[in-house]
Image (spheres, rainbow, N blue to C red):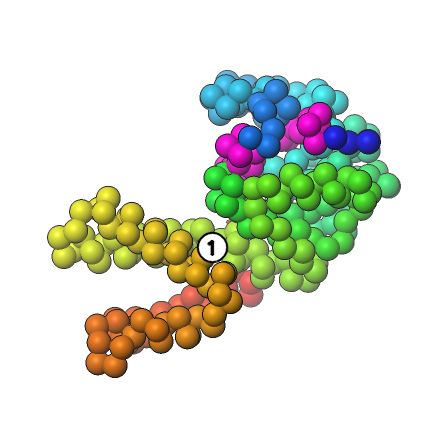
Amino acid sequence: MYEKERLKIGFLGFGNMAQAIAKGWLKKGVLSGDRLFASGRNLEKLEKNTLELGIQASSSNQALIQAVDMVILAVKPGQIKDVALEFKEELKEKIVVCVAVGIHWEELSDSLAEGTQHISIFPNTPISIGEGATNVEEKHSLSDESYQVFLELFESISVVTTVVTSQMAVAGVINGCGPAFTALFIEAVADGAVKYGLSRSEAYQLASQTIKGTGQLQLETGEHPGVMKDAVTSPGGTTIKGVAALEENAFRSSVIQAFDAILK
Ligand SMILES: NC(=O)C1=CN([C@@H]2O[C@H](COP(=O)(O)OP(=O)(O)OC[C@H]3O[C@@H](n4cnc5c(N)ncnc54)[C@H](OP(=O)(O)O)[C@@H]3O)[C@@H](O)[C@H]2O)C=CC1
Ligand SMILES: O=C(O)[C@@H]1CCC=N1
């Protein structure tokens, strides 16, 4: 029986994504540092990231797996299968959560022992402040009890969406790549404002709060984005002039082409 209060979680690979998840749990007080473990190839580099968070670091992946109940595989996609194969025996008794882009349940199964409880997910970086969006592959081999524990942990720092295997890639462009697209937009908006004399800090604050508020408004009202746009664009007003200029430069088509670039 897994109890959230006693569960120990290990990050095999402690880069950007693993740190974001750990920070989210710590920030939200879901888990304390003594329940979190991380392993990496270079202990000195690893400790730079673990010490400030109070997480225990190890240069041995094997020791990490043995010390925990849940293992989060957070190395690069190209390294996942090698790591899974190397520690196949040790992972047999654990809950394995794979965050690698493009490594779905079926694929990872080939590198793990039969019967291993594992699930593939696609989180995003805002999880570090408890505002993540996590796509979870529908197909998994966690027991009901393990799945409940997993869900509770990830729902505490993100909105969890169950996605069929064939749509994991497209959904992942929205939540996984989306923070980069959104950051580009924030930067561009600020550049526009700075050009006309607003300070960078004021521009970033205004831009980020406007994106946050608009997203929240859409989530809470379920309003069609076009209706939200219409509510701001008064006839002959200022906003429609800006919308027209953006469309002249194929704003929406540019975004759609980003999906083509990633998925084709
Ligand atoms: N960043 C993001 O927004 C998202 C990332 N992901 C997925 O998360 C995973 C990690 O990505 P990300 O955090 O960005 O990448 P990083 O390169 O930041 O992190 C990967 C980490 O794995 C470590 N590592 C490599 N090989 C081993 C090994 N054999 N044993 C232990 N540790 C090892 C690396 O250490 P070292 O540097 O010393 O080699 C590094 O710290 C990827 O699979 C990615 O697809 C998923 C969704 C979003
Ligand atoms: O670009 C990448 O490699 C991953 C996918 C989503 C975020 N980072």
Residue depicted at x 50% and y 38%: 128
Q: Nearer the viewer, residue 250 or 139?
A: 139
Tell me the residue that label 1 is attached to: 178
Which stretch appears magenta?
4-28
Looking at the image, can residue 44 be seen? yes
Looking at the image, can residue 91 be seen? no
Based on the picture, tell me whether residue 36 belongs to the magenta stretch. no
Residue 119, placed above or below residue 35: below
Q: Quadrant of residue 150?
A: top right
Other residues around mark 1 within 10 Å, as few (<14) / some (14–19) / many (≥20): some
Residue 87, placed above or below residue 255: above
Q: Quadrant of residue 64?
A: top right
Q: Nearer the viewer, residue 22 or 176?
A: 22
Q: Nearer the viewer, residue 230 or 13?
A: 230
Badge 1 element: helix
Residue 203 percent coordinates (x, y): 24, 50
Image side of residue 45 versus residue 33, left or right: left
Residue 185, placed above or below residue 1: below
Residue depicted at x 74% and y 43%: 148
Residue depicted at x 27% and y 57%: 189
Residue type for callout 1: Gly
Image side of residue 67 versus residue 48, left or right: right
Residue sticking out furthest to the right: 114
Residue 110 percent coordinates (x, y): 79, 45
Residue depicted at x 67% and y 41%: 152
